[in-house]
Image (cartoon, grey):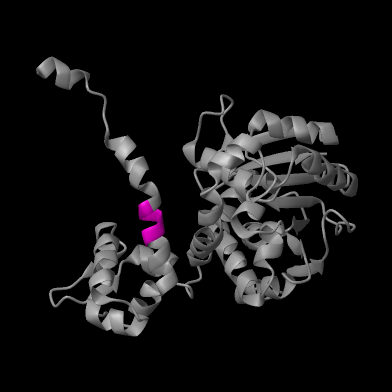
Amino acid sequence: MSGTAASTPPISGIVELIDGFKASKAMFTAVSLGIFDRLHKAPASCAELAGDLDCAEHALERLLGFCAAKELIVQDGEGRWSNTPASERYLRIESPDTLAGYVLCADRMQFRLWAHLEDAIREGSNRWEQAFGRKDGVFDHFFKTREDKEIFLRGMNGFGRISSPLAVAAFDLSGYQRMADLGGATGHLVIAACRRYPQMTACVFDLPSVTPVAQRAIAEEGLTERIGTVDGDFFKDPLPEADIYGFGRILHDWSDEQVRILLKKTYDSLPAGGAVIICEHILNERKDGPATALLQSMNMLVVAEGRERSASEYEALVREAGFSSFQFQVTGGPVDAMLAVK
């Protein structure tokens, strides 16, 4: 018996993967119901939450128990629930560091697209038409209404506030004076850069529908005198003048052909000695890790047209565009950083 037991491979990791989608959906549902926003106002019992959130008490009890097991909420001696510091900071809609927008995107969009992953793997294309009955894609889908746009941009901003300070600290950017954040959304990348490098001014270059959100985020950070906004489409319009451009979680959206277009355009627009900083997950050269990067690469398959890449693949793309040097740093945050110099 002992020999049989010793040769039995571990099953815990497989069971965790079987249950993984259930755990994700449970957290998505807690955010969507507004549990963490309600508990921010005051601690509450299950009965009180059920009444406030229009839920069946016996069903809500199960969700609250799971959230407690995952240390997202905690119960006091009188049966009242409260947020933990993690959920208070990251899962409330109104928190400056909220990831709730990204959670809602995952719930309303990615969860449905990932249901068709097998077809995406077989056919090598995104699943918009299969999941939603139309081909409009992520940007048209999430910019369709003001609320959708806010949800999408809040999601990107939450991760950006974590990742961008690490990215701009990965290299010495003190020699650059003007940064343009291409497809910059709320401007978290240039906000982090301007905070770290006092000599720098910047602009956020994005679609006109995004500009008001960026302006509000910049104003909230007290940086309106140093960071402006420029409306435009980076495929169609001239790029703003800068000696360093930034792509924060942008290039992974697009095919190699489209990335070549964007990198050549940035190269042609830069002065000699100018640079581009690229913030993305970096796959290892064997493409068997990290797991988070591989999941994101599959996400790009079902959601968009792009993928995550290895450092050598990015280096080949930037050198093809004309850049003379390339370096990268694994930051330990949600994205890694790469710098190419003209």
Residue 185 visible within the image: no
Seen at 76% across and 63% down, the residue is 206
Judge whether 16 appears above or below 210 on screen: above
Name the main secondary structure of what is drawn in magenta: helix
Q: Residue at x 61, y 35 (%)?
A: 122
Is residue 44 in view from this perspective? yes
Give the side of residue 165 with respect to residue 206, left or right: left
306 lies above or below 193: above
Identity of the residue drawn at 77% across and 69% down: 229
Depth check, front residue: 244 or 308: 308
Where's the C terminus, which quadrant? top right
- Image quadrant for the N terminus? top left
Whether 64 is drawn above or below 41: the answer is: above
Residue at left offset 78%, top offset 70%: 208
**In the image, is residue 25 part of the stretch drawn in magenta?**
yes
Based on the displayed image, in which of its 4 quarters is residue 224 positioned? Answer: bottom right
User: Of 163 and 83, which appears nearest the observer?
Assistant: 83
- Location of residue 234 by image quarter: bottom right
Q: Position of residue 60 (x, y in %)?
A: 28, 71
Quadrant in the picture for residue 151: bottom right
In the rendered image, residue 314, in percent from the top left (x then y), is placed at 70, 34
Magenta-highlighted residues: 22-26
Residue 154 place in picture, x, y as percent: 57, 67
> Measured from the top left, where is residue 53 in percent x and y?
36, 80
